[in-house]
Amino acid sequence: MRRRNIFGQRVRGQAVVFVGLALVVLVALTGLAVDGANAFNQRRNATNGADAAAVAGTRAITVQKKAGGGDSSAVFSEIESYLVKHHLDDALGLEWSAYYVDRHATRLTSDAEVTNTSADVPSGAYGVEVELRYRFATFFMSILGQPDLTVSGKASAIYGPASTVVGGDLIPLAVSQQAAQQSQDGQNVCIFGSDDEENPCGDSGAYQITPGNFGQVAFDPAGTNAPGDGSSCEAEDSEDSLGYWWCQGSQYPIYLGMQLSGDPGMLSNSLAEEIDWRIDNRRQGLVPVFGYVNDENGNNTTFTIVGFMAIELVSYDVTAPADERWVLAKKIGYYTTAGSIGGGAVDTGVYAINLVR
């Protein structure tokens, strides 16, 4: 009579159990890896969304205040439009809220919430704080009873005057405060002009700079007047030359109250290649605005900087006689010299919006 090996059957049964448990663990680990990576990406997406929405809302505040007032719905709509434009509204159960913050990125004590109403933007609002959260579907973890996960993001942004500027946006020209104040946004203006009525600038009057300086300034403290050459546009290392500054901006921080040297003198015809490169590749930029000039003339002149004006380069002529050279640019924006946006106060320089975490 054949005997059954009950012990062998028991061993085979135990193996099946172990294999089953191993598969469960493998699925769990796979789910943790795949869904964990997705959770990281979703978390980054939520953070980036909150960052950009806060910047969008803060930008709307500056527009409202510059226009002399506005209502909360404009700020609310700007934030909501950003979320829709970038498809965050497609996320599962998206919830978001926004609050006005002061210049220290602290929520206002009253009327703090950004609402879709005609309520005025609070006078003490310098930015917004945005909070959002949403769910996203899991892949493998749904097998274990976790069909979705939740992520959240939070960011604040505030605006303020750009008291210091450094980098590629800067153009080595200077414009007087009078010219910056009298010109209109979107208007073509001359950074400097000439007496030649045949060019687009004509007699620029208030836009003319102290004779002998033609609006060109040096960004380095030593007042370098070296023109450089066409290779400045591709230079990997910074250099003290007008060619480098025209192409790549300033490697030196330029700040309010700083004195810039007019030693470069008139706009050199050797800079035509660099100016062409700038117009072709980065025609928008910032030029320092000066409020004070020392008593010296010619290349000894220094300009005291009181702000920055955003411009878009249009055309130029550096080959004409010195007193007939010109640069034509479209004014994008400038806000005079001391105070804050709106409320009857005087505005300050170019405004920057900064994220605060």
Image (tube, grey):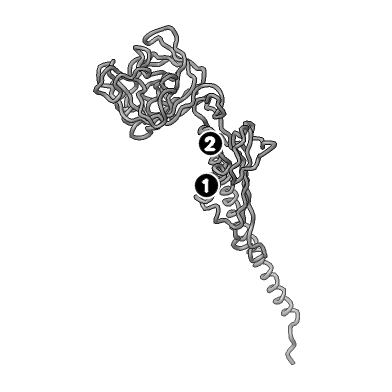
* Residue 306, x across and y down, in percent: 49, 19
Specify the farthest residue to the top: 295
Specify the farthest residue to the front: 118
* Residue 188, x across and y down, in percent: 35, 29
> Identity of the amino acid at label 2?
Gln
Q: Is residue 268 left or right of residue 72?
A: left
Give the Cα separation between the discs numbered 1 and 2.
17 Å
Q: Which mark is residue 140?
A: none
Query: According to the image, label 1 marks what residue?
Result: 82
| CB under 8 Å between discs 1 and 2 | no
**Residue at the image position 44 percent from the left and 15 percent from the top:** 303
Please tell me in which quadrant of the rendered image residue 17 appears. bottom right
The quadrant in which the N terminus is found is bottom right
* Residue 32, x across and y down, in percent: 63, 58
> Identity of the amino acid at label 1?
Tyr
Q: Nearer the viewer, residue 164 or 144?
A: 164
Query: According to the image, label 2 marks what residue?
Result: 64
Q: Where 313 falls versus 203 (above or below)?
A: below
Q: Is residue 97 left or right of residue 165?
A: right
* Residue 85, x across and y down, in percent: 49, 50
Q: Residues within 10 Å of mark 2 (few under 14, many from 20)?
A: many
Please tell me in which quadrant of the rendered image residue 135 appears. bottom right
**Residue at the image position 64 percent from the left and 31 percent from the top:** 104
Task: Say what secondary structure mark 2 lies in.
Answer: helix
**Residue at the image position 61 percent from the left and 32 percent from the top:** 123
Q: Is residue 213 visible?
A: yes
Task: Say what secondary structure mark 1 lies in.
Answer: helix
Count of numbered circles on the image: 2
Q: Is residue 35 visible?
A: no
Q: Is residue 35 left or right of residue 249?
A: right
The quadrant in which the C terminus is found is top right
Sequence-first disc among 1 and 2 = 2
